[in-house]
Image (cartoon, helix red, strand yellow):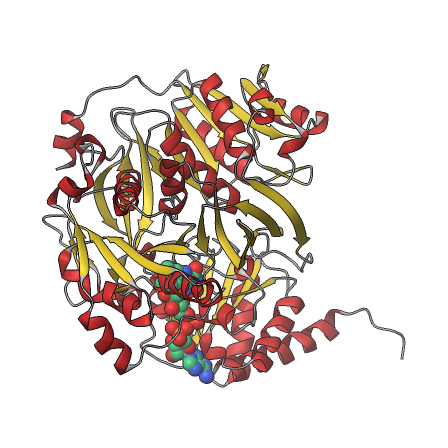
Amino acid sequence: MNIIVCVKPVPDPEKYHLLKIDTKTKRLIREGIPTILNPCDRTAVEAALQLKETHGGKVVILSMAPLFSQDRIREALAMGADEAYIACDALFAGADTFSTSYTLMKAIEALGVRFDLILTGTESADGATANVPTQLAEWLSYPHATGVSDIEVRDGYATVRKKIEQGRIGYRIKLPVLLSVEKNAYRPRLISAMNVIGAGKKTIGILTAETLGVDECRVGLKGSPTRAGELIQLDLRRAGREISGEPEEIARRIVDIAKKSGVNC
Amino acid sequence: MRQGFLKERRWIVAIKKILIYAEVFDGVLLPGYRELLSKAKEIFQGRGAVFAAAYAGPRNAVIAEELRQSGIHELYVMNSPLLDLYHPEYHLTALEMIVREADPDVLLITATRAGEEMSAALGVRLKTGVTAHCADLVLSGDGELTQMVPAFGGKVVGEIFTPTTRPRIASVKSGTFMAADLDAEECRETEVSAAPLDALNPSVEIVGFEKRATKKMPITAADVVICGGYGVATRENFRILEEVAEQLSGAIGGTRPALDAGWIEDESGMIGTSGRTVRPKVYIGFGVSGAAHHVCGIKDAGTIISVNQDPDAEIFEVSDYKAIGDARAVAQALRAHLARSGDETAPRINP
Ligand SMILES: Cc1cc2nc3c(=O)[nH]c(=O)nc-3n(C[C@H](O)[C@H](O)[C@H](O)COP(=O)(O)OP(=O)(O)OC[C@H]3O[C@@H](n4cnc5c(N)ncnc54)[C@H](O)[C@@H]3O)c2cc1C
């Protein structure tokens, strides 16, 4: 069974408090924030590796990402994936989810392999739209299910459980299918030093706009139906008046404040 | 920069029709519909815009009437027994057919697990832009829809436009806007044929559904929300917070680490960008550090009180009141205090 996992390098979400907006240029200053492999995507890689262990085949990693983030993609190889490709071209810059998913579709087609499963994380930590998985499935005319756990494959079908607000729906879906994997559904394996050395030896394939034969009107900023305007940093500061004293005193004050704020207690 | 961009764009027709997807579960209209309609009316009312609703589900006279009375001018329905439990192919095709029929300039969808999928997929089907999880919708000076989206966990908010394609598709999490009381309008109804569903030959089959056990008070509806963060440290301590929430007739919620630790059941109890937005009269957080992802979900709370042992905790900057102290100790004192005052107000039996 061939599985492709789409991943994305993102600025480390634990460091977002360091983000600032340049008051003059209105651009985001990301200095001091390292790039990591999107946390949700590790879960998807793990799911793929477990399925490979049961069913055989290969696990391929794909990312539309700048060249400098190659080492992050390599982490997925170190986890045990077989091959990795980066779709990378100046023409891809400024893409929204529409043109990103189009580009990923072209990349998957260009690899010339029939993938039974396309796996992704639920969302990226930076934009967090959760659009790309479903949009990629649409470009490929594959069925999809997002936020799934308990993936089982048998006789050309995948069964999954999809979380919705009211519970979990069980789906049985004909392969090939695109699935985005629920955040805590699989525990990503740890990477050993040996794995890192092994992954370091593998080459990462680079896919350019030319190799993919993309329609230039569909990629990058030009292919994006949405446009970004200004960035605004919200000012959420409040007074921060201190309640001091022993816990009993603090408790009494909290109840007083709650009453004053209109709560019956 | 932005001015330049607006000048540059090719003009497309002004916003005349807004279609809102009315998601129904188990015969109940989900609240996101009224929230979106209220917001849409707030920004487009008086501009001659037509407000419309889309319903795709089993035939349901009660829901249809509820929608007709909700303040819309047009109702589009596709009735089919295939549209009961959310099905990624049937529901998507149904909404696609309705949108093609209604031909709106703006399509608003509540960002439920189903709505998120449908909005994204429709963007590709209709070759138009999708803006996910808008924190606000406003009109720019020239009448264009400006979709305000949080990025980087809500640390920043960016304006997003869909300048040249239509409909502009926006998804919004339930609880982001407040539902207003809207007067009914004269409403025209269109039934869209469900024949495309029967012709679909789907790849997806529904093989089961496990309903989640209905739990206590939802955090989005409570006047008081108690939130436990990782600093609460143990399940036992978290229980104390649950009891305090109960004493205050409020709801208990948590941060992401509280969810990961299993102290709260699922995302419906998590507060923040990946969970729920809450707007209680009072929010009391214990052992919460104040990450952007979390703060984004409490910014509209009336009064924010935080208990944290770290005097430099970031949460204090966005709090009205801060108590520097141990979460467990304050929670226990609060429980004891409320138990006592509860006794005082209880009716006395003659000695
Ligand atoms: C894509 C993405 C989405 C996310 N979405 C959400 C979301 O929706 N909601 C959310 O909450 N998080 C979310 N997160 C996680 C978020 O970034 C933070 O990691 C999280 O909010 C931190 O939770 P916390 O404050 O409970 O824990 P911590 O950051 O670990 O903070 C614990 C706090 O407790 C204090 N403390 C420790 N011991 C005590 C004590 N004895 N008494 C009092 N105080 C004590 C500490 O001083 C500290 O401030 C998301 C992350 C990502 C990457």
Task: Name the spot of residue B6 as percent of width and height, x first.
Answer: 18, 28
Task: Name the spot of residue B237 as percent of width and height, x first.
Answer: 57, 80
Q: Who's the residue at 83% across and 72% down the image? A: B348
Q: Is residue B166 left or right of residue A196?
A: right
Q: In the depicted view, which residue is nearer to us: B138 or A179?
A: A179
Q: Is residue B77 above or below residue A130?
A: above
Task: Name the spot of residue B265 as percent of width and height, x first.
Answer: 58, 65
Q: Is residue B134 above or below residue B213?
A: above
Q: In the depicted view, which residue is nearer to us: A158 or B129?
A: A158
Q: Who's the residue at 69% across and 56% down the image? A: B214
Work out which residue is located at the far right of the displayed protein and give it.
B350
Q: In the depicted view, which residue is nearer to us: A114 or A16?
A: A114
The quarter of the picture where residue A248 lies is bottom right
Q: Is residue B48 above or below residue A106?
A: above
Q: Is residue B161 visible?
A: yes
Q: Is residue B104 above or below residue B319?
A: above
Q: Quadrant of the C terminus of chain A?
A: bottom right
Q: Who's the residue at 56% across and 31% down the image? A: B201
Q: Is residue B151 left or right of residue B62?
A: left
